[in-house]
Structures are given as C-alpha cells and as structure tokens.
Image (spheres, helix red, strand yellow):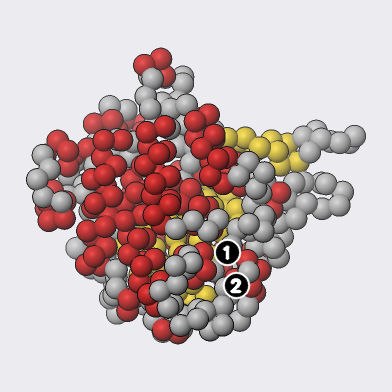
Amino acid sequence: MAYRILTRDEHFTAPGPKRILTLDGGGLKGIVTLGFLARVESLLRERHGNDAGFRLAHYFDLIAGTSTGAIIAAALAKGMTVAEVTAYYLQMGTKVFKSSWFRHGAVLARYDDDRLRDLLKEVLGEATTLGDASLLTGVMFVTKRVDTGSPWPLGNNPRGRYFGTPADRHYVGNGDYPLWQVVRASTAAPTFFDPESFTITEACSDRQAVHGTFVDGGVSPFNNPSLQAFMYATLAGYRVQWPKGADNLLVCSVGTGMVDPARAPAKIAAAGAVQALMSLMDDCASLVETMMQWMAGGTKVKTIDRELGDLRGDLLTSTPLFTYSRYDVSFTADCVNALVPGLSAKQIASLSEMDETDNLQVWKSIGEKAAETTVEAADFPPQFNLPEA
C-alpha cells in the first residue's frame, strides 16, 4: 500500500480517524517501551507496503510522552526509527546515568544533568524549537511547573492558544521553547536531576522577566500521559478537537514495566519521602488506567483490582470514546522468568529501579519478548490505516 505522508499541520487538521501514541515515564526502563515499539513499528511498516522509509511519526498524529517517554516521543517525532532511538538509549544509559561519589548527598542531585542536556541537544538539535517544522507530527510533553504547582502539557498544535509568541512579546509562545529544554524539563526527576528553568515572560520596560522552574512530569498525575493526551486531543480549550468514538480515535499506550508490589526497591526504601512519592505515582497510574479502560474498554486491558476486574463491558458511556490498547509488563518473578529465564532473585528485584544501567539489555529483552505475545496487527484496525497516496 502506497501511503501519503502528512505534514505536521495535516496531522492536526486533516479530516479522518486520528491515532495517538502515549509513552510512560520510568527512567532507563524506557528501553522496555522501545521493545514494544519495535514490534508496533514492524507491524505497521508491513501494513503500509514494507516501505523502508516508514516511521511511526507518519502513522501517529500525536505522540505524547512523560519523562523518559518524552525523550522517545521527541526522537520519534524527529523521524528516527525505533532501532535508532534504542541505540541512542543505550548510549544515554552509559553517559548520563553515571554515578559520582561526590553527588551522593542531600543537596546535589544524583546525576549530572549537563550530560543529559548535551545528549538531548546532539540528538534533537540545539536550535530546534517545539514549533519547528522538523517535527514530523504532533507531540505533547508533560512536565510540572513547581513554582506555580501546576502540570504543564506542552504541545506543538499550531492553533494552540499559547503556541505563538505575540507581537508585543507579552509572553514566550510554547512553539518558541527549545525542544531539548522542554524534554529536559519533563525528565527532571526529583533527586535524580536538578530542575530545569526557562523564560516564560521576557523583561521589558514595564515588567520583569518570569522564569518557570520545571520538574519531571511523573510527579504530576500523568506519568502515564494517556488521559492527558486524550484531553489534549478532545477538550475545546486545547484547540485540537478531534472527534471521539471507536472509529474516530485510536490510543496506543505503552508502559515501562510495573514494579512488583511485593518488593520495595532498595534505593527507594532507604528514603521514606521518595518511597511515598513513588507510591503516589503508582496510585495516579492506576487511576489513569482505570479511567482509560472505563472510557474505552478494549481487549488489551489489565485487571484493576480483584473487586473491579478489568472493567470489561463496564463503560462510562453507551459506546467507547476511542479504540484502546495498553502494553506493559510486570516485574514479578513469575512474569520475568517466563520472558527471560535464568535471572537471579537479586537481578529480578533490581528491575524495578529506574536507573540501574546493568539492566539495559535485560529490560530490552523483556520488552521485546512481551511484545511478541501482546502486540498484534488487530490492535490497529484497518479504518486507521494511513490515507493512500
């Protein structure tokens, strides 16, 4: 099948069914996500004529990411293949997540964010902005502005209220923010990296400059950005306003691996405040998943709990609001051993830690193996095929 490649603006405004890809946060466990995406890309490339030039940015009209998912989303939107992003991730693991003895304290973040900044500039382009035409499709990144206490979903919809910088430069439009800096803000996990700051309002004769301070979007309710992406695509205030319905909107959501609830990762258990924060993030993730399944149902769903089950047949509205698939894997011993046998109990326990560089290849294998049995061509119904050339 010869397909037509849409421009960024056509991804937002062209009529027809729309496709959303959402990518969770989770540190280096993002390579689990890439294991799933490798199969998604392969199936969709085959669907569209086995074109070597096919990219996920051609298929998905919006790619949304939080934290590590923001890095993947930006790289995919730049036109990278999943294999290229994976190679980039392996490089990031060895360069960025390198501990230093003098950073192990209560004041300094665990890792040097300059290394992450340099790598983001190298891969995404130092001069590339959020509104840059080099982005092949729509993107949305979740970050948290700590000086105002509010989640900030930053997207490149050209019709967005705050996309452009006004003539009087009363504020800096979202489209003029450096892409690497927006992604860096979304990845600024507390205790792991320092916050990221950039200018919201420039100084002039009658006002002072305003600089926002941002941290990882994972400390908002949207470490899984699926619900925020659905709101971004459909609520009138965001000015995207895609039609809802199972034949109109597809949401493909990919996780980074679920922590074994029976285990407390060693690096988290040592700090009660961080443990409480991680617990709250888990609660938010569960709520987001409950909402998504409640609104859409679907076959690729998880059991919420023993009381609710998987909500199959229990919809919020009379018909699904979108077609939905969720891909993730549990780091329980039974699940891990079924996918990658032979790991020690200590290795399995460490899989829940988001910065363990020794696990990169194991996480990659887990994602790829899990994808073989969970990601199917039927998850992408034919009505969502790209328009023919």
Residue at the image position 66 percent from the left and 37 percent from the top: 198
Which amino acid type corresponds to the residue marked 2 in the rendered image?
Leu
- Could you tell me residue 150's position as x and y percent? 57, 46
Give yes or no for contact between labels 1 and 2 (Cβ–Cβ under 8 Å): yes
Residue indicated by mark 1: 137
Residue 6's mark? Answer: 2
Residue extending farthest to the front is 52
What is the x, y in percent for residue 186? Answer: 52, 44
Viewer-side residue, 167 vs 320: 167
Residue most extreme to the right:
205
Residue 95 in percent (x, y) is at 42, 32
Residue in the foreground of this view, choosing between 231 and 387: 387
Of callouts 1 and 2, the N-terminal one = 2
At x 26%, y 57%, the residue is 368
Q: Residues within 10 Å of mark 2 (few under 14, many from 20)?
A: some
Q: Which residue is rendered at x = 24% and y = 51% of the image?
A: 365
Q: Is residue 384 above or below residue 92?
A: below
Q: How many marks?
A: 2
Q: CA distance from mark 1 to mark 2?
A: 8 Å
Q: Quadrant of residue 22?
A: bottom left
- Point out which mark residue 383 bears: none
